Amino acid sequence: MIKEIIVVEGPKDISAVKKDIRRPLDRARTERLEGHRPVFTMADLLKTGLAGTGSAGVRRNMPGEVLGIGRCSARKMLQRLNGYQITREAFKKSLNTIEESG
């Protein structure tokens, strides 16, 4: 049962609010684990320097943001790459952002 209703006056430009909501929704991903074969292995992360080095944690940040899977450990990145069915092409493009940023 609702005891109190609070009315908050929102912004006058509703289209701006829609745009702010749509942006994260467009990047949202869902996991599909049933019947899916893993594409990536830990060897892929080791080969690209995203695991096994002192700077791997920092190096994972950029691809994680570009791919929309966030900042995470190597194990979690591997799980997200496969769970969200990231393609090798998208993965390679995200690695280019590391090289471009220095």
Image (cartoon, rainbow, N blue to C red):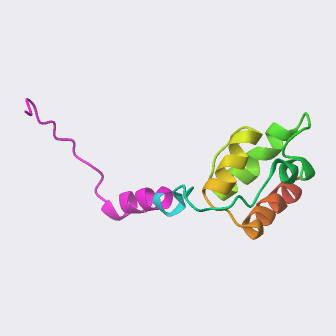
Answer whether residue 12 is magenta in the image: yes
For this view, does 23 lie left or right of residue 56? left
* Front residue (pair 65, 33): 33
Read off the magenta span: 1-24
**Residue 12 place in picture, x, y as percent:** 28, 57
Viewport quadrant of the N terminus: top left
* Vertical placement of residue 83 versus 60, above or below: below
For this view, does 61 lie left or right of residue 44? left
Q: Looking at the image, which residue sits at the far top? A: 3
For this view, does 43 lie left or right of residue 85? right
Q: Looking at the image, which residue sits at the far front? A: 35
* Vertical placement of residue 73 versus 84, above or below: above
For this view, does 26 lie left or right of residue 9? right
Residue at the spot 31% in from the left edge and 61% down from the top edge: 14
Residue at the spot 71% in from the left edge and 67% down from the top edge: 87
Dividing the picture into quadrants, the one containing residue 4 is top left
**Residue 28 place in picture, x, y as percent:** 51, 57
Residue at the spot 78% in from the left edge and 45% down from the top edge: 60
